[in-house]
Amino acid sequence: MKPFPQKLFFVITLFYSTLTFGQSPQSVSLYLKNGSIIRGKILQESPVYRIETYDQSQWVFQPSEIEKAIPLKSPNPNIKYKEKGFVHYTELGPLAMSNRASNGVTTSAFSFQTTNGYKFNQWFYTGLGVGADLYAVQTFVPVVLSLRGDFSNTGDKIPFYFLEGGYGFNATSNDVDNLRFGGGTTFAGGIGLKILFTNNTGFVIGAGYRFQRSSVTQLNIEKNEDFNRLTLRAGFSF
């Protein structure tokens, strides 16, 4: 029969080994004394440091070679950044700024847009967008070419830029004789933030500048009207 201390040591060792086996390797930034920084998962800490980098290479360092090790925030396993492929955006929000039409009405507006396209890499996405801009006195259906790109490809918060240009078709209903509304050039640009919550699906918010030109013809006299707006957007993407 084994002495009690040996039994106790065996149980403690087995319990500790079970806990260690169940834990995931910790991700760290390993700062070396020669100035190098290695990021990856710590596989072993004694008697040497063994670290596996994200390309699955393994590095071994003596403790004397290491200046410090800083733990990294564990990435969400449900989030996967999309490098290329089909991407969809649906966004809506106000077009804010004080601007008066020719009849003196303040033309505040609300905008809705959906965009479908292809992402070629982190920096370049192109797609076709269509939506509705509802001003107080006029309604437009913008059809635009959209360009987008991400400033980062890591983490669950991805900052991005957007540029859009096209034509806004005027869909204003007209019940007045000798009065005709026309569409015109539209373009927009700004920055935003995509907050991922599963795979490549996320919530998006953005802000920028929006321009829309229109024409009003009355008694055969045509006059252009320009709408300059601060665009605020919120929506989702996948």
Image (spheres, helix red, strand yellow):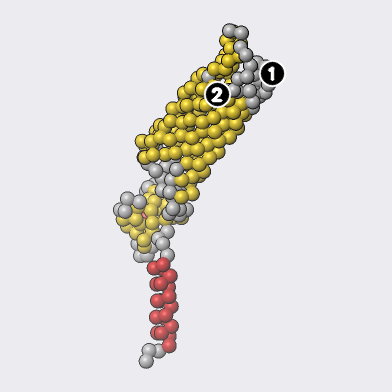
Residue sitting farthest toward the bottom: 1
Q: Quadrant of residue 151?
A: top left
Q: Which mark is residue 104?
A: 1
Neighbours of disc 1 within 10 Å: few (<14), some (14-19), many (20+): few
Q: Which mark is residue 171?
A: 2
Q: Nearer the viewer, residue 57 or 165?
A: 165
Residue sitting farthest toward the left: 57
**Distance (Cα) linking label 1 and label 2:** 20 Å
Q: Nearer the viewer, residue 137 or 93?
A: 137
Residue at 50% over, 38% down: 90
Where is residue 204? Give x, y as percent: 52, 40
Where is residue 152? Give x, y as percent: 44, 40
Residue at 42% over, 59% down: 26
Tell me: residue 156, above or below residue 62: above
Q: Quadrant of residue 205?
A: top right
Q: Which mark is residue 80?
A: none
Where is residue 147? Give x, y as percent: 43, 30
- The three-letter amino acid code for the residue at tag 1 is Gly
Residue at 37% over, 40% down: 85
Q: Where's the C terminus, which quadrant?
A: top left
